[in-house]
Image (tube, rainbow, N blue to C red):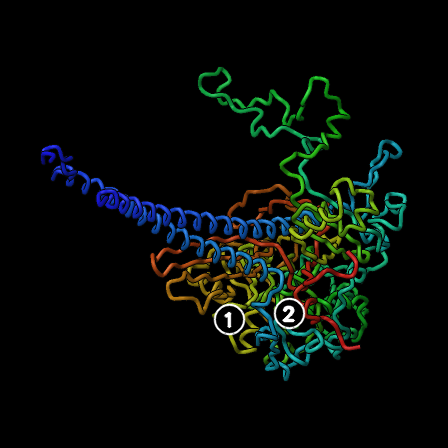
Amino acid sequence: MPALSTAAPRRAFTMIELLIAVSIGTLLMVVAFAGLRAASSAFATGQRLSTENALMRAGFIAGLDELDFWKGCDDPADGRVALRQVDDSRAAQDHPLKDGLGQPFTPMAEVWDDSTELPGRWEGDAQRWSAHADNQAARWRGNFAECMDTDCRFGRYGVFFNQRATLDIPAYARDNVALPAYGAAIAPRETWWCGQYRGLTSVLGYYGLIDYLPANAIHASYSRFYPEGPPAGDWGQYVNAGGIPVEWLTGPWKVHSWADSNRTPMTRYRATLGYAYGLMAGPDAPADAAALAARHREQTTILHYGTNGDIVRGFIARVGLQDRLTPLRPSHWPEVRTSVLRYFSLGKFFNLCIVRLADPVSGNQTQFSFNGFGTTLRGARQQRDLDSYAP
Amino acid sequence: MRPDRRRGTVLIAIAGICALMASLGAAFLLRMRSDAEATAEVVRETQARVMLVAGCNYVLESSRLGWDTTLGANGAHREGFGWIDVRNGQPGPRDQANNTVWSDASRFPAIGGRAARCPMQVRQRPPFAVELTAAYNPIAGPESADFGLPLMTRPDPRPVKRTPTETWDSWRQGDPMPRPTSTGMSWFRCYRDSAAVFVITCGAGGTLGFADWDEVVAENAEAQFGDQASFAAILADERRLWYRIEWSAAVAAPDFHLTDNEFGAPYGDTPKDRYGWSWGGNGNTPAKVIDNYVMHPRNSSKASHGRSSRCQIHINNPVGSVRWVQRLETAPAAW
C-alpha cells in the first residue's frame, strides 16, 4: 500500500499569489473599463461633434440656397408674401402711379401699368438699356451739378429730360431760363429713362431700384413743375426749381448722401457712402404695407457719424432674414439658425450669410459668416415671373 | 481545473471589453468617414459656386479681350466693344473694323452656338507670370548706409523666369500644362442665349465640362475618360448648377466728386430759393446754393477742412458689369 506521502501534493494558491492575481485582475479590469469609458466618451463626443458638423453644413447649404432662391423672402407656397404688398394709402394723393407703392417682390403690373402721369411700362430688354449712339433715350440727360436749391444757372434740363410726356411750365420757370421761348406747355424730348426710374422706384423701393438700374446710373430724374408749390401732402412730388423731385435730393427717402451736403444727383456709390438700403425681410420689418414701403425707401446711416449701435442693430433686425433649421429638434440637440442680410452700401451689394449654432448642453455658441454671390433681386423676381405683363 | 476557469473569466471579460472598444472605434471611424463624405459634398457645392464667379469674369473680360489672333496695323491688338456693341448696338464683340470676332456661327461666341467649355485646372505657369515677391525694394535698415532711403534699384514687378534661356515668347505663353493636384475639380460652360444673356453652367467634378457622352464623342475626347461607363460614374459624382446672367456695358461711374456745391456766399448773403428758404451756411462754412462743376483728381485722398475733396478707390472697369444673376432650378433647354 503506497504511503500517503507519495501522493502528489495538492495544488493551490497561496494567499499571496491569490492577492497578486486578484490585484492584477482588478487592475486589468479597471484599465479595461477606463478604456471603455474613455472610448465611450470619445464616441459620444465624436457623435455630438458629428451632429454639430452636420448641422453647420446644413446651415451653410441653407445659406447658399437662400442666396439663390430667396424663398425666405418670398415664397407664396409657404405663405411668405409680405414683400408683395402694395401700399395704396397714397393713391389718393397726386402720386405718379395711382395704384400706390410696391415692395421688392410686388408684381410689376400690379403697380406700374400705363398711367397718365407715367406712361409706359417696365422694359428690361438689354438692347433698350444699351446707351449706344442710336439709342439716346437710355442716357441720363440731367444736370449733375444741380443741387437742391438750384437757381438753374446752367439751364432747365427738365424741359428736355422728364418723366412726363407733356409739361406745363409755370411762369416763374419760364422766366428763369436763358431762353424763355419754351412756352407754357412743351413735350420733353426724352422721357423713357425718367419714366423707368420713377416706375422702378415706385414698384420696388430703393434696394430694388439700385438692383435694376445699370451700374453707372445717376440717381435723379425730372418731373413736372408746380406753379404754386406741390399739392398738400404730396411731398413725394415736391420738386426743386429745376424739376427734380426732392425725394431724390433730401428728406428721409432721399437717394443721396449727407456726407458732403451737396444734395445733387449722385451715383450709387456716392449715395451710399456710409449709408445702406436694405431688403426688409427681418423679424423687425414692419408688417403694415405703408410702413414697409417707407422702410424700403429710406436710407440708414450705418457707417457714418450720426449712427450708433442701436441704429445698426435696428437695421440688422429689420433686414436680417432668420431661419431656424431645426425647430422640432430633440432638446439636447444644438440649434442652428441661418441669417441672410441683403443690403446695399458703399457701392456694393452685401449678401451676408451668418450661420449660428447654439449648444444647449455645453452652452457653446459657434458662428461663421460669409458674403455670398448668387441670384440678384431681379433674378429672383424673374424666377417668380413678377416682371411680365399680361399679353 | 477550477483555477483555469478562473483565469479564463478574466480573459473573457477583458476580451469582451476590448471587442466593445473595437466596435466603438469602428463605429467612430465609420461616422467620421460618413462625415467626410458629407463634407465633400459641401466642398463640391462650394467649388461649383466659385465657378459662377469665374464664369461671370469670363463673360465680362471676353466682351472686350482675348480675341487677338494677329496684331493689326501698327501693332494694334484686336479689341471688342462689348456683347452689345457700345458704338452701334449690334451684337458683338466686334473689332475695330466692326467685324465679329467669331467666324463659326455654330460655336461660342455666336448666339446659340455650342457652349464654350472651360475646365479650370491651374496651369503650371500662367501667361505673363510675375513673381509674388511683396517688396522688391525694401527700405534698408539702420545697419545700411542707405538707411531709410526708398531706393528703387530693382525693377518691380519682375517676370517669373524659369530657365536662363527663357524668351519673351515663352514667358508670354507660360506653361499650359495643368498642375496635377488641380485637375478634374471644377469647370464652367458658357452658352450665349441672346446678345447679352448667357447661361453659365457651373460644375464640380471630373467631366471637364462635357455635357454628356455624346458631346465627348463629338469632340473625339473618349480617351480622356476611357469608356462611357467611366464617364457616367464621374458624372454621377458631379455637382452642376445652372445660372442665367446678363452683361451690361455699364461700369462704375467715376463720379465721386464731379460736382462741388460747397462754394457759395457766406451766411447772410445766401441766395434764397423760390420759397424764400436759404440752405446751408452757418457763418463759418459757405452756403451750398450754387451749381458748380469741379473735378477732383481721381487719386485724391485728402480732405481739407469743410471740403470733401476725397476720392473713392477708383475701380477702372473696362469690361462692363453683370446686371443680374438668376439661378435655374433645372437645366435649361440649351446650355
**Chain ID, mark 2:** A
The location of residue A239, given as percent across then percent down, is: 65, 70
The location of residue B160, given as percent across then percent down, is: 66, 26
Pointer 2: what residue? A204
- Above or below, A17 against B296 in this view is above
Are labels 2 and 1 assigned to the same chain?
yes
- Above or below, A94 against A144 in this view is below
The location of residue B129, given as percent across then percent down, is: 68, 30
Pointer 1: what residue? A285
Distance from disc 2 to disc 1, alpha carbons, whole Å, reads 16 Å
The residue drawn where x is 52% and y is 76% is A287
Image position of B172 (left or right of A92) = right
The residue type indicated by label 2 comes to: Leu
Image position of A292 (left or right of B129) = left
- How busy is the neighbourhood of tag 2: few (under 14 within 10 Å), some, or many (20 plus)? many
Residue A233, can we see it?
yes
**Chain ID, mark 1:** A
The residue drawn where x is 11% and y is 34% is A2
- How busy is the neighbourhood of tag 1: few (under 14 within 10 Å), some, or many (20 plus)? many
Image position of A13 (left or right of B164) = left
Where residue A155 sits, quadrant-wise, is bottom right
Say which element carries label 1: loop
Image position of B284 (left or right of B152) = left
Where residue A181 sits, quadrant-wise, is bottom right
Towards the viewer: B111 or A30:
A30
Q: Which of disc 1 and disc 2 is earlier in sequence?
A: 2
Do residues under tags 2 and 1 come within 8 Å of each other at their CB atoms?
Answer: no
